[in-house]
C-alpha cells in the first residue's frame, strides 16, 4: 500500500493542478485506481460458496479509507488556486485568472457552442 501512495499516486497526479477532467477521464482514473487496489489487496476467500472472489468497489473504498484520485486532483487544483491568489497581480497567471469566459452563441451545425474568452471590463 505504501508503494501505491508514494510512487503510483504521485506519478498519476503529477501536474494535476492544470487538468480539466471530463466525465470519461474521471471514470478512467477511478477504474485504474480500483484496478491497482484489487491487485494490491488480492482476492478474498468466500466461505459460503467456498471459492475466491474479487473485492467489490464498496469493499475496496471501505478498507482503504483514503481519498480517491479524483478527490486528490480537486485538492491539488484548490491548492494551486490559493497559490495563484497570493501571487502578485502582474504575473501572467494572475492576468489569465482575471479573464472570464462568456458564452457566445454562433450558428454551427447540430447546436454546437463555442467558448470565447473576453477581457473583463
Image: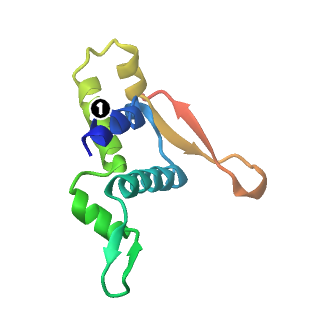
Residue lying furthest bottom: 48
Taking the image as shown, residue 32 lies to the left or right of residue 88, namely right
Q: Residues within 10 Å of mark 1 (few under 14, many from 20)?
A: few
The answer, for residue 93, to whether it is visible in the render is: yes
Color style of the picture:
rainbow
Q: Position of residue 76 (x, y in %)?
A: 30, 36
Locate the C terminus and report the quarter of the image it occupies: top left
Q: Residue at x 35, y 42 (%)?
A: 73
Residue lying furthest right: 109
Q: Residue at x 46, y 51 (%)?
A: 32
Q: Residue at x 75, y 49 (%)?
A: 108
Location of residue 10 with respect to 35 vertically, above or below: above
Write down the residue under mark 1. Answer: 81
Q: Position of residue 54 (x, y in %)?
A: 40, 68
Q: Residue at x 40, y 54 (%)?
A: 39
The answer, for residue 98, to whether it is visible in the render is: no
Q: Position of residue 56 (x, y in %)?
A: 37, 70
Q: Position of residue 63 (x, y in %)?
A: 23, 62
Q: Secondary structure at mark 1?
A: helix
- Looking at the rendered structure, the number of numbered marks drawn on it comes to 1
Location of residue 50 with respect to 39 vertically, above or below: below
Location of residue 47 with respect to 77 vertically, above or below: below
Residue lying furthest top: 90
Q: Quadrant of residue 83?
A: top left
Amino acid at each position: 500500500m505504501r508503494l501505491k501512495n508514494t510512487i503510483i499516486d504521485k506519478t498519476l497526479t503529477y501536474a494535476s493542478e492544470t487538468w480539466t477532467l471530463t466525465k470519461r477521464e474521471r471514470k478512467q482514473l477511478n477504474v485504474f485506481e480500483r484496478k491497482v487496489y484489487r491487485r494490491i489487496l488480492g482476492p478474498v476467500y468466500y466461505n459460503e460458496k467456498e471459492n475466491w472472489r474479487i473485492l467489490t468497489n464498496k469493499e475496496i473504498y471501505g478498507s482503504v479509507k483514503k481519498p480517491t484520485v479524483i478527490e486528490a486532483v480537486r485538492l491539488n487544483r484548490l491548492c494551486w488556486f490559493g497559490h495563484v491568489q497570493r501571487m502578485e497581480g502582474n504575473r501572467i497567471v494572475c492576468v489569465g485568472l482575471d479573464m472570464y469566459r462568456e458564452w457566445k452563441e454562433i450558428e454551427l451545425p447540430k447546436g454546437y457552442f463555442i467558448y470565447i474568452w473576453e477581457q473583463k471590463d
